[in-house]
Amino acid sequence: RVFAERHVVVLGRPEAGEYDGLRAALPAGTACHLVAVDDGPLDGRYGEVVGRVFALLREILRGGVRRPVLVQVVLVGAAGTETERERLACLGGVAGLLKTAHQENPFLHAQYVECLDGVSVIGVAGRLEHEAALETEPEVRYRDGRRLVARPTREGLP
């Protein structure tokens, strides 16, 4: 796919140099934004994360999107325990905001990509490239190197 603009919002706490490494591994012209997510309670931090993503989406939409634009919000890190994964899972709520923005303007393609399996920055960049090339899934999670997407299923009647 070809996008007129591409934005990557990195949520997490990359080690020194990793953010720059990720930026360098993405295609030229990709706007990269970092939103640090520190240890500790996320109740106040969640509002700040959503506010930053919302401000970016509003800025893009205000310009009048007439050609395809891709916004990928990627949560990076190594959730060593299920407790840590659950703590960070609340940030997945950003996916709802991204879906709403796409409904407002179908030229705005938005994805939430969760990479909490400790993959390298080169691996994260590869995943983002892979997701950008596909028909855009609004929400993708990588667990232990496996790609997981939500698919609706029909429940059988008793």
Image (tube, rainbow, N blue to C red):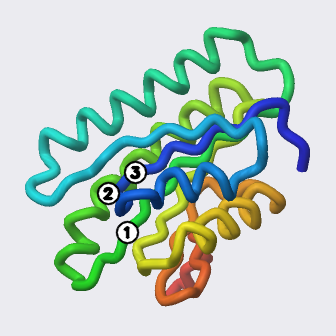
Q: Residue at x 20, y 54 (%)?
A: 38
Identify the amino acid type marked 3.
Leu
| Residue at the spot of label 3 | 11
Which quarter of the picture shows residue 40? bottom left
Inspect this view and state whether residue 151 appears.
no
Query: Looking at the image, do the residues carrying marks 3 and 1 touch, with CB atoms under 8 Å apart?
Result: no
Location of residue 61 with respect to 71 vertically, above or below: above
Query: Residue 33 vs residue 52: left or right?
Result: right
137 relative position to 40: left or right: right
- Seen as rendered, the residue at the extreme left is 41
Does the image show residue 63? yes
Residue that numbered label 2 is attached to: 13
Are discs 1 and 2 less than 8 Å apart at CB?
Answer: yes
Q: 63 and 9: which one is in front?
A: 9
How crowded is the residue under tag 1: few (<14 C-alpha within 10 Å), some, or many (20+)? many
Real-space Cα separation, disc 1 to disc 2, in angstroms: 7 Å
Q: Which residue is mark 1?
A: 77
* Dot in front, 3 or 2: 2
Which callout, 1 or 2, points at the residue further toward the start of the chain?
2
